[in-house]
C-alpha cells in the first residue's frame, strides 16, 4: 500500500517521540512492502516562531494532501505569555476543528510487564481494558463568547444535540465490538449541557439494544477510575471531562508516556497523537517514553489504513521490549533497566526485525 502521512512533531519532546514513531513506521514499511510518504510540517510553538501562526496554511495544506496525520505534542513555557491566538495549544485545537476530528479515542489496557508500576493493586490493574471516547471539537474549549477583562474571564459551555448524537453513536459502535457496555459520564445534577447529553444517550440507546448503558456523574467516575476501573468498558464523555479523566486513567497503565490516542471523524480520516504533552521538564534529554507515540502510529495503521497485522506487530514489539526488561525513566520504579528514548526505539525496531528474521527462517523450513 502507498500512503502519505503528515508528520507534525511540534514542541518539547514532540520531535523526539515522533522521530521514534517514524523509525518504527519505516521498519513496518520495509517488512510489509508498504510505501509511506512522510510530509513534515510545523505546528504549535515551533510554528509560532517560524510563521507567527500555531497552525500555518502550509501545515493545513500538507495535512489535506495526506491520508492521516501523526502528531507529537505542542506547548512550552517559552510561549506561556503569548496572547491566545499565538499559543501553541491553539494550533492543536484549530487542527482538530479544521478537520472535524470530533471523536478522540483513548484506549487503556493493562500492560502485563508494568503491573508493578500501577498505583492499583496488581489483581485489579491486570484486568483493566477500557476505551475513553472523548468529544473533541465542542464544549468549553470552543464555546462562544470566550473573553477576558481585567476583572473577569468568560468561557461558554455549549453542546448541540447533533454534536452529542454523533459522539454517543461512535461510543455505541465501539462498545458493540467489545464487551457491549457504555458508561456515559456527565454532570447532569448541575449542567444543562449534561442534562441534554443524558437525554440524547437515552434516545440513542434504543438503536443499540445489544449495548448496556449506565450514566455516571463525573466526580464519581473520577473516583471509580482509580478504585475499580474494571467496571468500565467504553466511557463516553464531553471534551473537558474526557481530557481530565484520560490523564487520570493513564497512571493505571504505569505512565502517561504509555497512552496513545486517535482523533477521528466518520470517514476514517484521523490525527494520531500521544495523550501526553510536550513534557518541557525532560525535553531534549533523550529521556522521553516514545511508547505512546509509537502506539499512536499503530492506531493510525489500524483505523485509517486497515493494516491490522502491522498494527498488532508494533504493539507486540513494544510489549516485548518491556517484557525483556527495558523501560524509560518515567517507569524507573518498574524494576527494569532504564534506557534512553533512542535505545528504547532501537530495541522496538530490533524486535520487529527479529520477528522478520524468524519468519524467514520458518519459511525456509517449509
Ligand atoms: N497533545 C498535546 O500536544 C498536549 C497534551 C497535554 C499538554 N500539552 C502541553 O504540554 C505542556 C506541558 O504540559 P504538562 O507538563 O502539564 O503535561 P505533560 O503531559 O507534558 O507532562 C506531565 C508530566 O508527565 C511527564 N511525561 C509526559 N509525557 C512523557 C513521556 N512521553 N515520557 C516520560 N515522561 C512524560 C512529564 O515529564 C511531566 O512530568 C503544556 O504547554 C501543555 O499545554 C500538550
Ligand atoms: C494541550 C491541550 C489543548 C490538549 C487538550 O486539552 O485537548 C491536551 O491536554 C490533550 O489531552 O490532548
Ligand atoms: Mg490532556
Image (cartoon, rainbow, N blue to C red):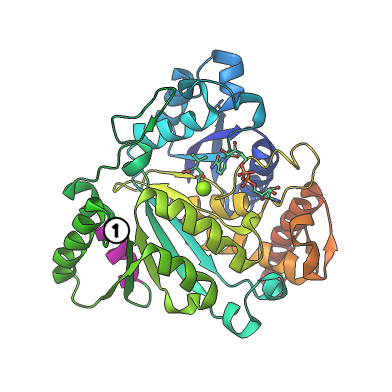
Q: Which of 231 and 20 is in front in this view?
A: 231
Viewer-proximal residue among 243 and 94: 243
Q: Position of residue 171 (x, y in %)?
A: 31, 62
Left or right, residue 98 beside residue 56: left
Q: Is mark 1 on a helix, strand or loop?
A: helix
Where on the picture, by quarter, is residue 250? bottom right
- In the image as oriented, which residue stretches furthest toward the top? 51
Instruction: Give the quarter of the figure containing the C terminus.
Output: bottom right
The residue at 62%/56% (across/down) is 256
Q: In the rendered image, is residue 306 in sight?
A: no
Front residue of 317 and 202: 202
84 shown above or below 106: above
Q: Is residue 62 magenta?
A: no
The residue to which callout 1 is attached is: 170
Q: Is residue 276 left or right of residue 132?
A: right
Task: State the image coordinates of residue 346 (x, y, percent, origin top left).
Answer: 78, 52
Amino acid at each position: 500500500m502507498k500512503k502519505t502521512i503528515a508528520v507534525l512533531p511540534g514542541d518539547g519532546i514532540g520531535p523526539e517521540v515522533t522521530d521514534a514513531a517514524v523509525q518504527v513506521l519505516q521498519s513496518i514499511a520495509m517488512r510489509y512492502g508498504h510505501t509511506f510518504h512522510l510530509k513534515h510540517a510545523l505546528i504549535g510553538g515551533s510554528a509560532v516562531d517560524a510563521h507567527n501562526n500555531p497552525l500555518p496554511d502550509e501545515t493545513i495544506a500538507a495535512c489535506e494532501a495526506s491520508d492521516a496525520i501523526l502528531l507529537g505534542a505542542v506547548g512550552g513555557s517559552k510561549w506561556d505569555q503569548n496572547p491566545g491566538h499565538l499559543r501553541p495549544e491553539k494550533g492543536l485545537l484549530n487542527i482538530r476543528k479544521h478537520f472535524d476530528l470530533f471523536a478522540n479515542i483513548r484506549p487503556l489496557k493493562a500492560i502485563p510487564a508494568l503491573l508493578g508500576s500501577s498505583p492499583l493493586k496488581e489483581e485489579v490493574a491486570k484486568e483493566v481494558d477500557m476505551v475513553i471516547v472523548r468529544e473533541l471539537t465542542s464544549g468549553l474549549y470552543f464555546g462562544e463568547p470566550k473573553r477576558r477583562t481585567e476583572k473577569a474571564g468568560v468561557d461558554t459551555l455549549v453542546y448541540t444535540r447533533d454534536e452529542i448524537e454523533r459522539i454517543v453513536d461512535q461510543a455505541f459502535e465501539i462498545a458493540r465490538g467489545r464487551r457491549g457496555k457504555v458508561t456515559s459520564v456527565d454532570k447532569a445534577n448541575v449542567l444543562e449541557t449534561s442534562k441534554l447529553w443524558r437525554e440524547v444517550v437515552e434516545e440513542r440507546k434504543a438503536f443499540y439494544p445489544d449495548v448496556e448503558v449506565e450514566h455516571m456523574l463525573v466526580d464519581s467516575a473520577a473516583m471509580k477510575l482509580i478504585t475499580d476501573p474494571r467496571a468500565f468498558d467504553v466511557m463516553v464523555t464531553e471534551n473537558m471531562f474526557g481530557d481530565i479523566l484520560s490523564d487520570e486513567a493513564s497512571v493505571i497503565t504505569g505512565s502517561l508516556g504509555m497512552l496513545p490516542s486517535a482523533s477521528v471523524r466518520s470517514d476514517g480520516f484521523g490525527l494520531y497523537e500521544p495523550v501526553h504533552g510536550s513534557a518541557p521538564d525532560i525535553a531534549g534529554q533523550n529521556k522521553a517514553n516514545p511508547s505512546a507515540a509509537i502506539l499512536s502510529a499503530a492506531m493510525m495503521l489500524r483505523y485509517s489504513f486497515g493494516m491490522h497485522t502491522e498494527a498488532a506487530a508494533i504493539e507486540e514489539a513494544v510489549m516485548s521490549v518491556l517484557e525483556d526488561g527495558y523501560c524509560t525513566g518515567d517507569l524507573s520504579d518498574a524494576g527494569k533497566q532504564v534506557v534512553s528514548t533512542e535505545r528504547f526505539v532501537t530495541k522496538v525496531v530490533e524486535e520487529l526485525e527479529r520477528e522478520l528474521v524468524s519468519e524467514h527462517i520458518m519459511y525456509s523450513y517449509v
